[in-house]
């Protein structure tokens, strides 16, 4: 029997879908990330989880620690009849410490950030009037409430989350590679002093600005400072932080434990028990540890990406997470992202309600560039997995996954010299994005076709739908 709450949810869904003219969900291909049997019965990790380095012979392979991006050695230069007009990138931040919500009450290994940021200070017109300020986390105080949340990583000076030194190195390399393509190879990138021709955007989460710090040094090594544009948290389309009850309703419906979402959780109860025996997480936990594999995934992948061991119980150090179990959790995490953002029949609408506002801004950037009123040539957005995943979801990526650290989606606008017509190429992991839609692979798609797809997919009345 369908209860009133469920009926209300589906009524809201049906009503909203009816208002989205032409929105069609195209299921993704059957892949190791979408096939639950392969997820449950596999043995290997779905990529690299223990190093930011991907051998050149394997570049393009999924690397959670440092995802592939555009590089000169793999970049395919279009034929000369196409002239590059505009580039906009959205990427996830680079590798970091885990979120505080994803740490155990007490961790069995150290994590030191004494040689790292984050830096927080103001400045005025006179540089001699300020000095730099670096945050270091204080622990071991007599504050009685500190003991309530646990020591986490005992004695750690880190912020959770914070981009690590290794993450800064990855961001630097990322910026150098972007410069290698759009600067050295194509001669398209503006000079560092042409600040009216490029733009960086960040969110209120400091890890995006930290990533910009490393990336910007790689892109423009002569600059010591960059401007990161940021929207108010109440309507930030990049984070995204927009309030939308309908989107939240759809998200709850997708991850309803009594629906298909609950199947993979029920089938991995023994794995959950083994994990809880090590982590100390209670079986009836209400902080999200038992409703998905997100928290365990983040905790262990952050450790392994930084060369740290998998966790052992602080009560009995002989009980540890085995690599095979970690690999299964990594496969489950990719399955969950594939399901949430692509496999569920409502995932396309969910993605459109999540990142639709950002795409509307992107369309305006294209429009004004084609009209000759947009001076920007290169724009770069530093965001989160919760931003990049719905970007791929809205475009209906054919081979869905959990966007790893530094994942980027590149939008290139071209003009065909003979006809003055505009075309779009979208790159993910450095190569044209394969979608499940009639647009196919987004490689020199007529801009009018791309625009029509977005018009059909993104509700025109977003503000009203999200009331």
Image (spheres, rainbow, N blue to C red):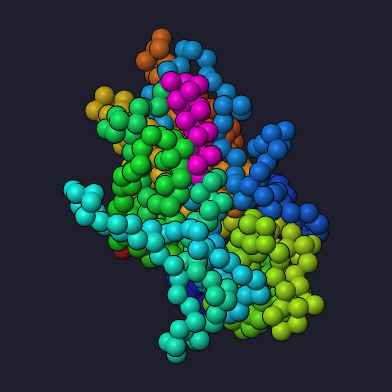
Considering only vertical position in the picture, is 111 above or below 125?
below
Q: Nearer the viewer, residue 91 or 104?
A: 104
Compared to residue 157, the image places residue 305 above or below, namely: above
Image coords of residue 162 (percent x, y): 48, 60
Residue at x 45%, y 25% (from the top left corner)? 183
Q: Quadrant of the C terminus?
A: bottom left
The residue positioned farthest toward the top in the image shown? 418
| 193 on left or right of 71 | left
Residue 242 highlighted magenta (yes or no): no
Question: Is most of the magenta stretch helix, strand or loop?
Answer: helix
| Vertical arrangement, residue 6 with respect to residue 462, above or below | below
Magenta part of the chain? 171-187
Report if residue 423 is visible in the image: no
Q: Quadrant of the N terminus?
A: bottom right
Which residue: 57% across, 76% down?
A: 154
Horizontal relation, residue 112 to residue 237: left or right: right
Residue appearing at x 65%, y 37% in the figure: 60
Residue 212 visible? The answer is: yes
Identify which residue, 51 or 5, lies in the foreground.
Answer: 51
Res. 248 image quadrant: bottom left
- Decide if residue 1 is on the left or right side of residue 82: right
Q: Is residue 176 magenta?
A: yes
Residue 257: image x %, image y %? 60, 72
Q: How many marks?
A: 0
Q: Position of residue 292 (x, y in %)?
A: 61, 68
Q: Residue furthest front?
A: 128
Name the residue rendered at 36%, 27% in the picture: 190
Farthest left residue in view: 125
Q: Is 277 on the left or on the right of 18, as rendered?
A: right
């Amino acid at each position: 029997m369908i209860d009133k709450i469920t009926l209300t949810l589906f009524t809201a869904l049906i009503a909203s879908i009816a208002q989205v003219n032409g929105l069609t969900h195209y299921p993704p291909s059957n892949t190791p990330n979408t096939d639950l049997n392969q997820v449950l019965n596999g043995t290997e990790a779905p990529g690299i989880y223990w190093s930011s380095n991907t051998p050149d012979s394997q570049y393009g392979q999924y690397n959670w620690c440092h995802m592939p991006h555009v590089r000169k050695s793999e970049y395919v230069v279009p034929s000369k009849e196409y002239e590059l007009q505009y580039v906009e990138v959205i990427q996830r931040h680079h590798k970091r410490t885990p979120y505080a919500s994803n740490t155990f009450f007490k961790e069995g290994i150290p994590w030191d950030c004494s040689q790292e940021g984050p830096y927080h200070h103001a400045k005025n017109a006179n540089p001699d009037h300020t000095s730099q300020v670096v945050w270091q986390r204080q622990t071991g105080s007599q504050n009685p409430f500190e003991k309530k949340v646990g020591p986490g990583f005992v004695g750690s000076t880190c912020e959770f989350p914070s981009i690590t030194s290794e993450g800064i190195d990855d961001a630097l390399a990322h910026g150098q590679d972007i410069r290698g393509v759009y600067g050295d190879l194509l001669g398209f990138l503006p000079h560092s002093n042409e600040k009216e021709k490029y733009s960086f955007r960040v969110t209120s989460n400091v890890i995006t600005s930290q990533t910009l710090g490393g990336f910007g040094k790689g892109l423009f090594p002569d600059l010591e400072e960059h401007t990161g544009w940021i929207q108010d948290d109440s309507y930030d389309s990049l984070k995204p932080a927009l309030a939308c009850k309908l989107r939240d309703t759809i998200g709850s419906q997708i991850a309803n434990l009594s629906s298909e979402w609950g199947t993979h959780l029920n089938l991995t109860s023994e794995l959950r028990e083994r994990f809880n025996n090590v982590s100390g997480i209670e079986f009836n936990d209400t902080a999200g540890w038992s409703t998905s594999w997100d928290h365990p995934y983040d905790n262990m992948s952050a450790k392994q990406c930084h060369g740290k061991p998998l966790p052992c119980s602080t009560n009995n150090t002989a009980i540890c997470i085995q690599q095979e179990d970690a690999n299964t959790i990594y496969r489950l995490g990719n399955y969950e992202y594939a399901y949430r953002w692509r496999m569920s029949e409502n995932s396309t609408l969910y993605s459109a309600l999540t990142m639709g506002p950002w795409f509307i801004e992107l369309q305006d950037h294209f429009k004004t560039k084609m009209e000759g009123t947009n001076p920007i040539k290169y724009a770069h957005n530093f965001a989160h997995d919760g931003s990049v995943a719905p970007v791929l979801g809205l475009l209906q990526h054919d081979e869905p996954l959990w966007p790893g650290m530094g994942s980027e989606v590149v939008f290139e606008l071209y003009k065909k010299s003979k006809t003055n017509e505009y075309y779009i190429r979208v790159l993910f992991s450095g190569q044209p994005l394969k979608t499940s839609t009639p647009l196919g692979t987004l490689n020199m798609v007529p801009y009018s076709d791309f625009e029509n797809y977005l018009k059909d997919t993104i509700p025109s009345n977003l503000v009203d739908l999200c009331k």
